[in-house]
Amino acid sequence: MKKVKRMQLTRRDFVKGGLTLGAITTTGGLAACSPPSPTTAEPSDEEAAVSDAIARTWETYPGDIDESRITETIETDVVVIGLGASGSYVAASAIENDLRVIVLERNDQFNANGGSHFVFNSKPQRDLNKEVDAAVAVKDFLNVCANKVSATNVWVWANRSGEAADWLAEMVEPYGLYPVLQHSDNEPITPMYPGTIMFIGGENEPVDVSDNDPYNGDLGLNFVPERDLLGVLLEHIESKGADVRFGQKSERIIKGDDGYITGVIASDANGNYTRYLASKGVVIASGGYDQDQDMHDYFCPTLSHNPNGAAVPLFNMGDGSGIKQALWVGGTMQANGDHPPMIFWGSTNCIKNLLVNKLGKRFSDENVTQSNMAAAQLNQPGGTIYGIWNEAYAEQLPAVSYRADDSSYTVSPEQMKSKWATLVEAGLFIQTESIDEIADKYGIPDDVLNATVEAYNGFCTNGVDEEFRKDPTTLHELTGPFYATEYQSVASLASMGGLHVNEKSQVLDANDKPIDGLYAIGLAAGDFYANQYTTRFAGNSLGRCLTFGYLLGRQIAGKEE
């Protein structure tokens, strides 16, 4: 299968609004329902057959591995494929419940990204009286998905995630890590539920304003606290007897004649094969499929067919291998074949005084949440948008602390303006007295842009946004000198779709029957997202990983019904 080499980017690289992304190509993808054709012309039968053959190559079983090439057989209770967040959580839960665990990771280290977990009513939330009303929040989440997901699975997350977070907090406390509540303010720029926690206390926690996002001082992009958390979990599970094997790539899931999954065959860098027999189950925690171009094009048409085209960077490095292996033994993909990407626009939750498109026109209430603004950007000419603001905006932005328990994690207007000046020097922002100069710099029609700014200032004076009904408390008049920046492309952190699973994380076959002994969690598991990944529940992907990892370890050990 064709592979496209991806640029290794960090989230910090992405948020630099002037970053040139034209050389970055798109990859990844997997199988279920074919997405609609991006063109109106009907393909011929021959064209359709060729297209379908290309799109579904991942379903083709590559054949058995020659028995003579398998040099060793190792027995255990549970084999976990992948040591990212979901693999770490399920391995920790399994080992805590006295199961023998082998973890197979194809890379030479664990995979950690981000660190924010959305959970319902964990101890940090309860301590600050920031409980989330699940009856309201879950309905909101399901409405975003238009109910094209498993409501049962979503409710398991809502009902058990607080318990899972408290379990994890107790486990990592002896290692110096502890959870704190983030994003507790339901403020007008980025309204979100107060359920996001991160585990801090390690070397990757934020310590001062130098860790802040350069645009608005919102912490969270210059550090990855999940590295500390997964590092502690690795130490912990190995101390309890888990056998963690790096450089072991799962190649085939083994299915017995009785239909039960019995283990995994994996290879090392030298081409040696080992058979790992699992008496109680195999867990696919190998991530998504973004680095398989055919699968990504097929399952994530939002990114395959958009104005940015191949310029959209894909951060997730999953190659779909675990998902494919599940399909080869009878697993299926979620029924909803249009998987939403976890997309973000140029700067997180910040320069939203005035946003315009290439034509010089506003296109949205600027207060739309992070993920929805990225979706709106994809719908603009060329997939490009522009932010315009002024120095006074530093005082007008709400002072939101990134830690609900510590208000010192709030950036001052002076620090914000200092960072803006640094970005002007770097060429990522421009500063000018003239709207015409902004128009000339970015190729925007100057008459249209001037008219847009004039109309916007009129809305600010009157206190009513007659175009998009923006919250009047966030209408701030634009007077020079002005700042401006260009957001050339959204970025995708992951494609949010995967294997068809039930609330017990069991992989289901074409008849919706569980495949005995086979489980999938994290990005390898589907039935949880549709339409749009929503940042109203910031960190819900890791929150899902934690919840189902915790429950699955207990379930395999017989401690869950």
Image (cartoon, rainbow, N blue to C red):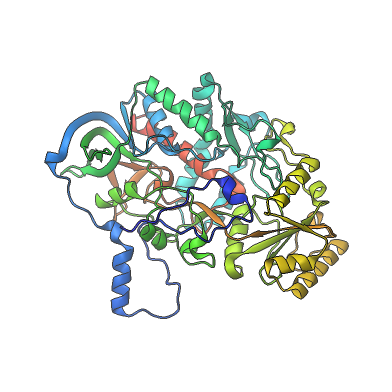
Is any part of residue 122 visible from this angle?
no
The answer, for residue 276, to whether it is visible in the render is yes
The quarter of the picture where residue 274 lies is top left
Where residue 526 appears, x then y in whole percent? 41, 50
Q: Position of residue 100 (x, y in %)?
A: 30, 26
Q: Residue at x 13, y 41 (%)?
A: 67
Q: Residue furthest left?
A: 68
The total number of labels drawn is: 0
In the figure, 556 relative to 511: above or below?
above
Instruction: Say which of 454 and 196 sits in front.
Output: 454
Quadrant placement of the C terminus: top left
Side (left or right) of 172 relative to 370: left
Q: Is residue 561 above or below residue 213?
A: above
Q: Give me the residue at 58% from left, 43% from top.
A: 134
Q: Quadrant of the N terminus?
A: bottom left
Q: Nearer the viewer, residue 240 or 357?
A: 357
Measured as percent of width and height from the top left, residue 40 is found at: 45, 79
Q: Residue at x 54, y 57 (%)?
A: 532
Of 106 and 178, the residue lying toward us: 106
How far from the left and from the top, in percent, is residue 422?
Answer: 72, 46
Image check: 38 left or right of 514? Answer: right
Q: Is residue 397 left or right of residue 332?
A: right
In the picture, measured across the screen, residue 441 lies left or right of residue 249, that is: right
Occupied quadrant, residue 97? top left
Instruction: Tell me: residue 456, above or below residue 496.
Output: below
Q: Residue at x 66, y 28 (%)?
A: 127
